[in-house]
């Protein structure tokens, strides 16, 4: 079997299994298992591939065709132009979430703030991106899940960062419980999917941890906690940037009506209102 035939077979198999981006994903798996990029794949099409590599490749294709996300199979994914380790047990970084580090870095550059909290930090991709691109700050990641923290630790190491600290704990306990220096910026991509919507999401999402998705009956549990027990700890002039789900803006804002002095709503690349930024 040569790599090119393996690739063609895979595109077909992935299409049959309902994968929307079959050619792209098949190429990613070829690169991962055979270390061949797109051009090499097309050029080396007559060379037989190593049997062990082929076996590993077929295992990966099988996992993908059963619905496991490509990101878990590859074990890493790009976010904010950086690589992050991911796997079962941690939410996969999504492109719309890149709005959060962008806002945080702009704010830090403008105000010279130093302390950043990333609440419900998961793989750490948001806080780590901020720490990497604004080395002059100190970032605290707050996350309760052991599995997620396993990846966050690897990611801190991978990026060789000494200005990131992982705080294992329950965000629902509120800022006072942790007793850390007050932040200038809080970023968060909390679980925000309404409990009863989780079952109806894409097949791939069923492989992701429920704890990273389930935001309670209306999906808003964490925004309530953040308004009541975190917003107050921001330094004067500080900002809070929160990702939220489609059509949740009004619900989220209702928690902050009397405590914020203003802010703005930022749309994602699909034109959906995705992030709320509020000033203290
Ligand atoms: N963006 C994710 C989704 O719609 C949800 C992530 C989250 O709950 N923070 O699947």
Image (cartoon, grey):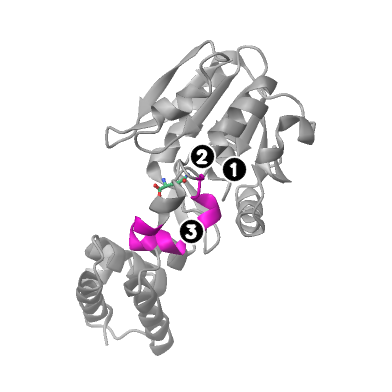
Front one among 174 and 80 = 174
Label 2 crowd bin: few (<14), some (14–19), many (20+), radius 10 Å: many
Regarding residue 273, the answer to whether it shows in the image is yes
Under circle 2, the secondary element is loop
129 relative to 26 in the view: left or right: right
Residue 17 to residue 245: above or below: below
Q: Which residue is mark 2?
A: 189
- Quarter occupied by residue 79: top left
Which image quadrant: the C terminus? top right
Q: Report the span colored magenta.
A: 199-216
Q: Earlier in the sequence, mark 1 or mark 2?
A: 1
Q: CA distance from mark 1 to mark 2?
A: 7 Å
- Please name the residue shown 66% across and 39% down the image: 172
Under circle 3, the secondary element is strand
Label 1 crowd bin: few (<14), some (14–19), many (20+), radius 10 Å: many
Q: Which residue is mark 1?
A: 120
Count numbered badges in the picture.
3
112 relative to 245 in the view: left or right: right
Looking at mark 1, is its residue's CB closer than 8 Å to ligand 1?
A: yes
Regarding residue 135, the answer to whether it shows in the image is no
């Amino acid at each position: 079997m040569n790599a090119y035939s393996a690739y063609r077979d895979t595109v077909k198999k992935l299409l049959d299994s309902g994968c929307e981006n079959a050619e792209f994903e098949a190429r990613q798996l070829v690169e991962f298992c055979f270390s061949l990029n797109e051009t090499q794949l097309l050029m080396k099409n007559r060379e037989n591939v190593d049997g062990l590599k082929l076996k590993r490749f077929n295992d990966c294709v099988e996992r993908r065709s059963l619905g496991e996300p490509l990101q878990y199979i590859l074990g890493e994914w790009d976010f904010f132009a950086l690589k992050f380790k991911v796997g079962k047990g941690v939410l996969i970084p999504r492109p719309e979430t890149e709005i959060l580090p962008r806002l945080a870095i702009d704010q830090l550059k403008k105000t010279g703030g130093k302390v950043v909290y990333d609440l419900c930090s998961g793989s750490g991709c948001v806080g780590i991106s901020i720490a990497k691109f604004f080395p002059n700050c100190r970032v605290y990641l707050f996350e309760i899940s052991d599995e997620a923290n396993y990846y966050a630790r690897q990611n801190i190491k991978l990026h060789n960062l000494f200005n990131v600290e992982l705080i294992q704990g329950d965000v629902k306990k509120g800022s006072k419980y942790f007793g850390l220096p007050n932040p200038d910026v809080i970023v968060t991509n909390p679980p925000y999917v309404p409990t009863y919507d989780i079952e109806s999401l894409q097949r791939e999402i069923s492989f992701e941890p429920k704890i990273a998705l389930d935001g309670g009956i209306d999906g808003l549990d964490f925004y309530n906690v953040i308004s009541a027990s975190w917003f107050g700890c921001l330094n004067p002039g500080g900002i809070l940037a929160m990702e939220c789900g489609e059509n949740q803006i009004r619900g989220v804002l209702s928690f902050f009506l009397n405590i914020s002095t203003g802010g703005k709503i930022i749309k994602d690349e699909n034109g959906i209102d995705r992030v709320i930024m509020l000033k203290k």
